[in-house]
Structure formats: structure tokens, C-alpha cells
Image (cartoon, helix red, strand yellow):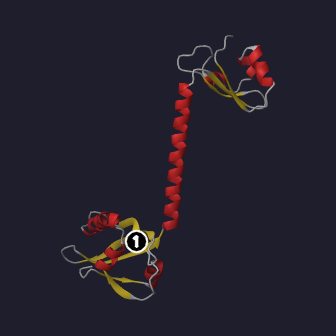
Amino acid sequence: LPSGEAQVNDRWHTMLGLPPRRRLTDRADWRRLVHPDDVVRVEALLAAHFEGRSGHYEATYRMRHADGRWLWVLDRGRVVERDAAGAPLRMLGTRMDVTESHEREVALGLSERRLREARDDMAATLAALPDLLFEVDREGRLLGVHAPPGDTTLPPADALTGRRVAEVLPPDAAAFLDAGDPPIYFGFGSIRA
């Protein structure tokens, strides 16, 4: 560590699309391969470990492959030898290509965000509806009920969910549902029991 050099194995080179060769690499080699947006953060994590502020070093960041694409790598390491003043002398660690798992996590996060946005949009749409809205299964049971804010024509939705339409709605509305092919959504501008 005082020299800034690192002994790396063949896997380090092949992971980055470089010809396998055992050699010492220096900090400048590493810095040239790390994505510019990640350098400061990763160096801060290394410094925290070197200074004894963390028990180990761990960072996920991007490194440039020989073909120009960016790989996500996970570095883990620990100083295993220090001098009398506590300065690091030797560190051991691993570097793994985690590109696929990182991309899956990003895709999952994007899907979750889109689902939240769709739910929020649906909730906003339902809140804006001036009518009653019912979701009914094939057996004529209410799966969901939406009433506009301030509506007092029906009991609370949780008291209706699971009940048969004929128990809740006026006969003409229940007959309308019997003519359909549930599960369906339907709404009424107004209902008077």
C-alpha cells in the first residue's frame, strides 16, 4: 500500500477484457478504469478503511471493460498489516463482476417505481370519480367498492367486500349485474336504496 501498487491475478485482467498476465498495477491504472462519477466515492471509502474508521472496505462501482462498456464490480477488502503508527502496509481483497445482478436490481427498482406510480395514478383517478364503482367476481360477490369522498349512500367498503351484490344493491342494479359476465367493474351515477 505505501507504494500504491497492487498484485492482481489473471481473473482481474480477463474480467476487464485485458490479456491475462500477472503484474503489479498501480493506483493510476485503477483510476483510469474507474468511472469518473465513482472515483471520489470509492476513494473516500478506501480512505475511511485505511484510516481505521471502518472494519473493512466494500464498494460497488463501474470499471471500463476493454471493449468500452462499463462493468459493475464489487470490491471487498481489509487491511491485514499496519505499521507501528497504524498506517496500512498490506491489504487483501476480492473484486467481482456484479453487472448482471446490478442490472436486475435496477430493472426491479424501475418496475417497482412504475407500479407505485400506477397505483398512485389509479388512486387519484378513483378519488376523482364522482360515481360509485364496484368490482364483482363471477359469483356476484363484491371484491372492491369505491365511493366518492363524502358519499353516504353505502356503508364503508370493508363492510361490503365479500357480500353478494343482491344483498347490497337495489334489485334493478343487482339484475343488471346478473346479465353481465363478471368479473367486471361497473359504476352508477347515483344509487338510492
Q: Foreground residue, 64 or 162?
A: 64
The image quadrant of residue 135 is top right
Seen in the picture, residue 3 relative to 160 is either above or below; the reply is: below
Q: Position of residue 78 (x, y in %)?
A: 34, 72
Q: Foreground residue, 51 or 159?
A: 159
The image quadrant of residue 178 is top right
In this view, the residue farthest toward the right is: 179
Q: Determine the residue positioned at 49% across, 67% down.
A: 99
Residue matched to label 1 = 63
Q: Position of residue 110 (x, y in %)?
A: 51, 51
| Callout 1 secondary element | strand
Q: Position of residue 187 (x, y in %)?
A: 66, 23
With 26 as the anchor, is 84 left or right in this view? left
Q: Determine the residue positioned at 33% across, 83% down.
A: 25
Q: Foreground residue, 12 or 79?
A: 12
Seen in the picture, residue 132 relative to 53 is either above or below; the reply is: above
Seen in the picture, residue 181 relative to 51 is either above or below; the reply is: above
Q: Determine the residue positioned at 31% across, 64% down.
A: 45
The image quadrant of residue 77 is bottom left
Q: Amino acid at mark 1?
A: Met
In what quadrant of the picture does the C terminus appear? top right
Q: Position of residue 137 (x, y in %)?
A: 74, 31
